[in-house]
Image (cartoon, rainbow, N blue to C red):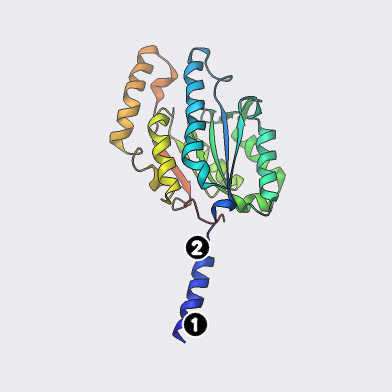
Amino acid sequence: MKPLFLFWLLIFSTQSHGYVAREERVLLVVSELDSTGAPEMRDLYRITEELTLSAVNIFLKPYYGEVQYLLGHEATIPNFKKALLEMSHREDIMAIDVILSLHGSEKKLTFFDKKWKLPSLEHEFIKLNSTSLRKKLRMMYNLSCYGSYHNASFIKMGFDASVGSVAVNANSEIEFIPFLNAWREGHGFQKSFDLTNNDFALNLSDAPIKVYGEWKKSSLSKTNSKKIFVGNTELRIASDAK
């Protein structure tokens, strides 16, 4: 009886926790900073975009069955919806993760086509009425400024977990690679930010930029890169999407 009991215990344990193999998960990177940003910041935005893509290719691509990109003029809401829908309809894909690098404010996200108000963004996805999409959407890593204001919308759209900054997000060059490394090694979603989402690290990255913003009287004075998490904060790279 004991071996049989252990067998069923293993079966039910696997079913309850779930597991998604590398080839069953896909990552979508949406990045558009250059054309919609301040002209004087475009060189910095180009460098940021290049570093984002390079880091994803080096650190995460080997850990996903597929990585897709919507960059520059391709980073529109119609393309975003189309890409996610096509992924959700594929039987070989069980989990969809997204890294979003756009300009943002408390109430909007700026894709290449236009600035989208969050209620409108939610409505676009509700109109899709796709059960398969909601079942497969998993992690949203939002690098946009004021990303914490977007968290609730992404959860309503179907993501299991979402993270974003309190205000202007200015620590990506410090945060991005440590997160990618921790995430690929199987750490929990929130725990993957432990190295950089603490008072010491945030002060190190944010304080000089905030001072510069106050001197220039620019939006950088509102820098606060602290990350806020919503949803399943224990989510891991191999976790089943719910």
Dot 1: element: helix
**Residue to which mark 2 is pinned:** 17
Report the front residue among 19 and 155.
19
Q: Where is residue 136 in the image (x, y as percent from the top left)?
A: 61, 51
Q: Quadrant of residue 172?
A: top left
Label 1 packing within 10 angstroms: few (<14), some (14-19), many (20+): few
The answer to whether 166 is drawn above or below residue 91 in the figure is above
**Residue to which mark 1 is pinned:** 4
Dot 2: element: helix
Query: How far is mark 1 from mark 2, CA to CA?
Result: 20 Å
At horizontal 50% and vertical 37% (from top left) the residue drawn is 56
Which amino acid, mark 2? His
Which residue lies most toward the left here? 200
**Nearer-N-terminus badge (1/2):** 1
At horizontal 46% and vertical 82% (from top left) the residue drawn is 3
At horizontal 58% and vertical 20% (from top left) the residue drawn is 36
The answer to whether 66 is drawn above or below residue 170 in the figure is below
